[in-house]
Amino acid sequence: MDALGAMQAAIGLMVSFDPQFLQIVGLSLRVTLSAVLLAALIGLPLGAWLALSRFRGRSALIVLINGLMGLPPVVAGLFVFLLLSRSGPLGPLGLLFTPTAMVIAQTILVLPIVIALTRSTLDDLWQEYREHLTSLGLTGWRAVPTLLWDGRFALATGLLAGFGRASAEVGAVLIVGGNIANYTRTMTTTIALETSKGDLPLALGLGLVLMALTLAINAAGYAASRIGARFAG
Amino acid sequence: MITGRTALGLALVLAGPAFAQAPASDRFITVSSTTSTTDSGLFTHLLPLFKAKTGIEVRVVSQGTGQALDTGRRGDADVVFVHARAQELKFVEDGFGVERKPVMYNDFVLIGPKADPAGIKGGKDIVAALKAVQARGSLFISRGDKSGTHAAELTLWKAAEIDLEKVKGPWYREIGQGMGAALNMASAQNGYVLSDRATWLNFRNRGDLDIVVEGDRRLFNQYGVILVNPAKHPHVKKAEGQAFIDWLVSTEGQKAISDYRINGASLFFPNATQPGA
């Protein structure tokens, strides 16, 4: 394999500011970050609810959600495809082969990670601070903001894990996005396409750029949590 | 931790462009087509010309012919542009398409390793070549994905009077993937593979592969275009889809197709006016 060619392709892509390349990077980031934020909006409250409530079937639900962390992206993609296809229940919305469809599919992939990690983090915190919070009059839902705040570093790591899962996957976005040039083509689907064209150095170069971006975002997340920790004491 | 309100704000800011990216006007159509038309670079050449003339954006989803027709059948595309005449005619006959129009052709070539273990290099008889591949048990990579190329390959085995179900063995690998993936595998394992010429000419990772058989009339590969039937799927963009079809078969569109060359070689040959194509 032509590692030098891949390095050259990667550097060439990054310094060229080719508009088409920037558009692909921009779409990848927008879709993935939207999915992570949507998953956080839904998953944090759901995870908190699961941590604090006790009901029949709770254990089964926890096992189910933990299991869904291993949901194959291609299955999530197929599910969303059937849902959004013109012949499917949400067909009239005309969302198949759009970035929105890709956000939906990736949200489904990230959601179990956010719920499961929120649940386990808050479970532990609740055991630890239960008496303290109760003495302050913070029970049930009123304890959630405090617990979320105390668990913020662990939860941020969970969101980064979700980001990693979404940005790395190709199966779901390929099925529901269709890899349409200038519209639904992301970093990973471009890599798949260039591989199929036999342009392996360019494909590997794109892979290096994607890894660099993922590293940069994780570094930013880590730095933010370190700075946050210093100020929070 | 991000509070609910800032998170919602952030989500809207970030998601906004993703959702708003559907262009201001509704002037776009979705075309389901084959991997060969995309992998060969033809659409990259054609679509900007069409958009400049009509302002209509064409969004191409490239799949194998079988899957591309299925996408049309489900109503997820406005136009299908594929290469498997019998399947196309059935698509129209079943009421999913309005009318099939021939657009262009190219041809298939048999690709194989330069060492040529089956001893068929330079031949012009594809049927004899396939018989030799099977008799020697030389490695053959099949698309196995119900694409137009896969359908053509199966027709050729039949013409060679070889019953694949009976003689299938480790020498015959069905990979269930696109043309590029099949070529990559043939390149890595030095196998024979049937490819459309356009994808082959545009393929970079050739390794030790070369064309071993070409020029047989049975390797002819016709492309057709069909508007998905608005009577079945009312949301189909009839006017815009028809405009694309009309342009493809017009003198101007046909010239644009023949103008697409790689290293001076034409990849597709327009024949919209040829009767019975």
Image (cartoon, coloured by chain):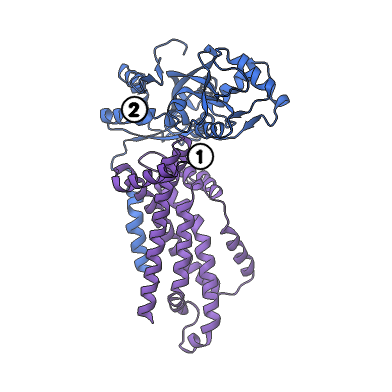
Chain colours: A purple, B blue
Q: Percent position (x, y) of residue A221?
A: 39, 66
User: Which residue lies at the image location 48% right of the left edge and 65% below the top edge?
Assistant: A158
- The disc labelled 2 sits on which kind of residue? Leu
Do callouts 1 and 2 mark residues in contact (Cβ within 8 Å)? Answer: no
Left or right: residue A84 versus residue A33 is right
Q: Secondary structure at mark 2?
A: helix
**For the residues carrying marks 1 and 2, which lies nearer the camera in this image?**
2
**Label 2: chain?**
B
State which quadrant residue B268 falls in: top left
- The disc labelled 1 sits on which kind of residue? Ser
User: Can you see residue B18?
Assistant: yes
Q: Residues within 10 Å of mark 1 (few under 14, many from 20)?
A: some
Marks 1 and 2 sit apart, C-alpha to C-alpha, by: 30 Å
Q: Secondary structure at mark 1?
A: loop
Image quadrant occupied by the N terminus of chain B: bottom left
Q: Is residue B134 above or below residue A176?
A: above
Q: Percent position (x, y) of residue B152?
A: 56, 21
State how many labels appear: 2
Q: Is residue B54 above or below residue B212?
A: below
Q: Percent position (x, y) of residue B174?
A: 62, 32
Question: Residue reaching furthest top?
Answer: B275
Q: Is residue A229 above or below residue B239?
A: below
User: Which residue lies at the image location 41% right of the left edge and 51% below the top edge?
Assistant: A210
Numbered tag placed on residue B46 in the rendering: 2
Left or right: residue B228 versus residue B113 is left
Residue position for label 1: A87
